[in-house]
Amino acid sequence: MTSENTEFRELAEAEELATAAASGELVFGETLDADAVLPSRSEAPTKADDTLVVTTVRLTVRQRRRAEEIATKRGTDLATLIRGWVDEGISEEEQDYAVSAADVKRMLAGLRRIA
């Protein structure tokens, strides 16, 4: 396996861990009872809550270009990338996470240097 393939695999794994941490699927610490921490079915989001709506956001040319570069590098489209960033921001605001995605990324970057 080439170093480029290894680097890509490590990046993909880091992004997968960051996504899992941001969504609450990855929790560090003691084991919790899922029924005690997950919302009841009546509180769970409905399918209608996941309907996509058009939202206009104005970016600078630099922001747009950079975001497009990042989306291309990650193999996704700009809209999906921005939705992910919004989800991360909402989780940060609501403190709906065990650790922040940024913390996970820093931790993984440190592990790469050690290994």
Image: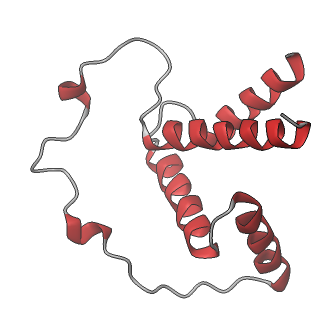
x, y percentage for residue 108?
73, 29
| Quadrant of the snapshot with the N terminus | top right
Visual colour scheme: secondary structure
The image quarter containing residue 32 is: top left
Residue at position x 62%, y 72% from top? Answer: 77
Residue at position x 44%, y 43% from top? Answer: 23
| Quadrant of the snapshot with the C terminus | top right
Q: Which residue reaches farthest top?
A: 30
Q: Which residue reaches farthest left?
A: 42
x, y percentage for residue 28?
50, 20
Q: Nearer the viewer, residue 5 or 69?
A: 5
Q: Nearer the viewer, residue 19 or 99?
A: 19
Number of numbered discs present?
A: 0
Residue at position x 59%, y 60% from top? Answer: 85
Horizontal relation, residue 42 to residue 70: left or right:
left
Q: Is residue 60 above or below residue 49?
A: below
x, y percentage for residue 62?
85, 79
Q: Is residue 58 above or below residue 88?
A: below
Horizontal relation, residue 91 to residue 59: left or right:
left
Horizontal relation, residue 109 to residue 16: left or right:
right
